[in-house]
Image (spheres, grey):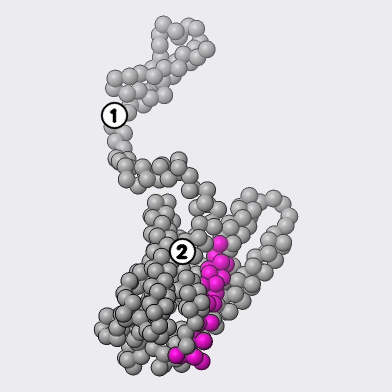
Amino acid sequence: MAENCTWFGSQPSSSSQCVTINTVKRITAAFSLIGCICMLVLIWLFRKYNSLAQKMILSLAVAAFFDSIAYVMDEVLLDGALCNFQAWWLTYFDWCALAWVCCITLNLYLNVVKEMRTDRYGLTYHVTAWGVPFLLSCLPLFGDYYGPAGAWCWITDEHVAWRFVIWYIPLFSLIFLMMLCYLRIIYVAKQRVITWSGTYDPGRERTKILMAEEIKPLKWYPCVYLAVSLFPLLNRIHNAFYPSQPMFALTLLHVMSAPLHGLANAIVFGLDKETWSQLTVTSLRVAFQSRLCDSTKIKEYHPANVRYMNRIDEEDSDSGDDTTVLFSMPSMTLRDKGP
């Protein structure tokens, strides 16, 4: 790895700096990968994939999982087919993860502000979140703009404008729009809660609680992307003005934050109170048993063996006791003697 690294010049210290950068990148990417795996396991374990919103969060976790894989790669790749593939892979799944966050925000906006049912939009969300990133990630590939770009392969320093057109300008524009959407969602939700007054209605109260609990964790997803994208943006701006003078500190912060999408998403996923309450030894054990050891079988009910009848006990008829038998089985007769 060290012999392929020329980011910080040819001084002896540059080799150790490259090793440090690559090691930090792999560690942060590994944590992100573990976070994605934990998130996927919890979704599977607690069956959090029934509603449209849950399915969208599942798709986000899948996109972040594959995005983390590329960052785990050890070697600094030379320009070639493998380097181009890594660059395309990173661009595609970075965009997929961002697209799913946008779809989650839009879906919540339509539910709360527009009061629309969005179940029928599931296919549209999938086509948009997987299809549009594919087209965007292929544009630099057609122009041969991918190549070595620091700690991993991406759009090269010779095509700086493409970095901002393909990723950074759309990224921060979408983050800004999502922030505005969440401000509007929170405002409308609070106003709706205030206007819900009058006679106590259990259903209405439950709706208010569910609305508040759903908004709280989802609003952090845009914040996650803002947090993990700030240092990469600063480093790429510095690279644009000083392409031959990379800063070790900025590069280190870049590789510490860029691969953390998956881990940050997993933390936001864990902020859900319902999910957090289930993270106990007992709940996990019961969930695993339900998933792996559930042998419950639903059989057809046959009423042929049940015979309804009225039987009068002659011996007790004078006492006035109620001896009506509700039902009897072939091998058993139930009688109500009374007190």
* Residue at image point 49% right, 48% down: 278
Secondary structure mostly seen in magenta is helix
Residue 156 seen in this snapshot = yes
Q: Earlier in the sequence, mark 1 or mark 2?
A: 2
* Residue at image point 60% right, 53% down: 206
Q: Vertically, is 165 above or below 171?
A: below
The percent coordinates of residue 308 (x first, y second) are: 36, 26
Stretch of the chain drawn in magenta: 217-244
* Residue at image point 49% right, 65% down: 264
* Residue at image point 29% right, 22% down: 330
Residue at label 1? 305
Instruction: Name the residue type under label 2.
Output: Leu
Residue at label 2? 263
In this view, the residue in front, 21 or 181, is 21
In this view, the residue in front, 282 or 26, is 26
Say what secondary structure mark 1 lies in: helix
Residue 105 seen in this snapshot = no
The percent coordinates of residue 65 (x first, y second) are: 38, 66
Q: Nearer the viewer, mark 1 or mark 2?
A: 2
Instruction: Name the residue type under label 1.
Output: Asn
The percent coordinates of residue 11 (x first, y second) are: 40, 83
In this view, the residue in front, 205 or 93, is 93
Q: Residue 320 magenta-drawn?
A: no
Query: In the image, which disc is placed on residue 161?
Result: none
Q: Residue 224 magenta-drawn?
A: yes
Residue sticking out furthest to the left: 81
The percent coordinates of residue 335 (x first, y second) are: 41, 17
Q: Residues within 10 Å of mark 2 (few under 14, many from 20)?
A: many
Say whether residue 15 is left or right of residue 242. Answer: left
